[in-house]
Image: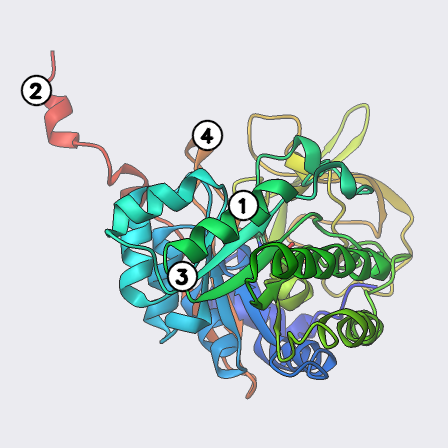
Amino acid sequence: MSSNFPLSHDELVKITKDFPTPFYIYDEKAIRENVREFIKAFSIFPEFREYFAVKACPNPYILKILAEEGCGTDCSSLPELMLSKMVGLNGEFVMFTSNETPASEYQYAFAEGDIINLDDITHIDFLKKSLGKLPETICFRYNPGSAKHGCNSIIGNPKESKYGLTREQMVEAYRIAKENGVKRFGLHTMVASNELNPDFFVDTAKLVFDLVLEVKEKTGVKISFVDLGGGIGIPYREDQKKVDLNYVAKKIHELYENLIVPAGLDPMRICFECGRPITGPYGWLVTTAIHEKHIYREYIGTDSCMADLMRPGMYGSYHEITVSGKENAPKDHVYDVVGSLCENCDKFAIQRPLPKIDRGDLIIIHDAGAHGRAMGYNYNGKLRCGELLLRENGEVKQIRRRETIDDLFATLDLDGVKNFE
Ligand SMILES: *Cc1c(COP(=O)(O)O)cnc(C)c1O
């Protein structure tokens, strides 16, 4: 079940007077409570850390809230590293899990003391050339290939995925890093996205812990932290169940006791770098129904589009939709709820039973707090919407304004074009 929208119809209508739709709104209180619960579940480990995946919701206000709750960040680009820095996060609190990384980004991360997570064995040499030496701490990303099955379509079969090192390369990489004076080592993997089966994460931990032992045996390298990646799903559909984090933590802890402790590797830090389960259920896209159309199907046209939320169009993802003020009305109409893009995949919902929708109704698209606004783009000259934060005291703060036409044209030389023949 997706979590409840925190505002009554009247409260929402009042907000739209100051902030016209479309906009994202995030619930600070719910995000804080949720991340505390997440961290608490894993606090049975000696040194657990959650590195929030910035790409899921790259807004510094959200990052600041999460930093206050003890999270670090997981970054994949220079701007994400910079956003982290803005909210006081660097060093041990930043995991730089990038791929196809330019030297300049490694240099920035190194200067900040961020943890660099290498995506390939050849990047050891690349990093050494980029920095003049290797950092004291290094992490490698493991791709288990055909050793791991059952992944879903977002990330694909590990064997076909571009990320990480093979098992043989992992062992070799630690050997090389050690010879080059690296002192502290991490091991990372991420093989699923939006996975709801809790045992999947336990199996992944087993695979990783086995590799930790193999690395120690073959190279003498003691891994001091294991990053189990992101990929913990959320129940987008009403019939789906939230991942039981206490179960996941307990089962991984058993493996830790049975494998890591006897090998003399305790304390070894366990980390996740989840985005989706942290903010996903606590962000909503609010849009207005501005058109209705009756052809072969019934359509509701909104003032938003795929440029604000592309998951449905890109992955065919399901997002629950409610109509503000009509939460208890019978769902006796079937609609395609669509955006304004000149792409037929620009549909927030397809053949969805909903209450009768009238022009002017406020449509709430649920579970949009991760990989929502962040994935937006400007195709068709669309201007991305802004972001609001519902504070714990009930105030609403704009944490990102909507884009303007000037923003869209900012990269063009408009004077130049006047003289262009
Ligand atoms: C996308 C990504 C994450 C976060 O994934 P969620 O599904 O949002 O938890 C974490 N780590 C890496 C390397 C990623 O690419």
In front: 185, or 377? 185
In front: 187, or 324? 187
Residue at 77% over, 54% down: 320
**Of labels 4 and 1, the one closer to you:** 1
Q: Which residue is mark 1?
A: 172
Q: Amino acid at mark 2?
A: Asn
Q: Is residue 165 visible?
A: no
Asked if the beta carbon under badge 4 is closer than 8 A to the nearest atom of ligand 1, the reply is: no
Disc 4 on helix, strand or loop?
helix
Q: Position of residue 369 (x, y in %)?
A: 61, 60
Q: Position of residue 409 (x, y in %)?
A: 27, 37
Distance, label 4 to label 2, CA atoms, is: 26 Å
Q: Amino acid at mark 4?
A: Asn
Q: Which residue is mark 4?
A: 380
Q: Does the residue at mark 4 contact the one at mark 1 (Cβ under 8 Å)?
A: no
Q: Amino acid at mark 3?
A: Val
Q: Which residue is mark 2?
A: 419
Extreme-top residue of the structure: 421
- Mark 2, other Cα within 10 Å: few <14 / some 14–19 / many ≥20: few
> If you read the primary sequence from the N terminus, does the residue marked by circle 1 or circle 3 appear first?
1
> If you read the primary sequence from the N terminus, does the residue marked by circle 2 or circle 3 appear first?
3
> If you read the primary sequence from the N terminus, does the residue marked by circle 3 or circle 4 appear first?
3
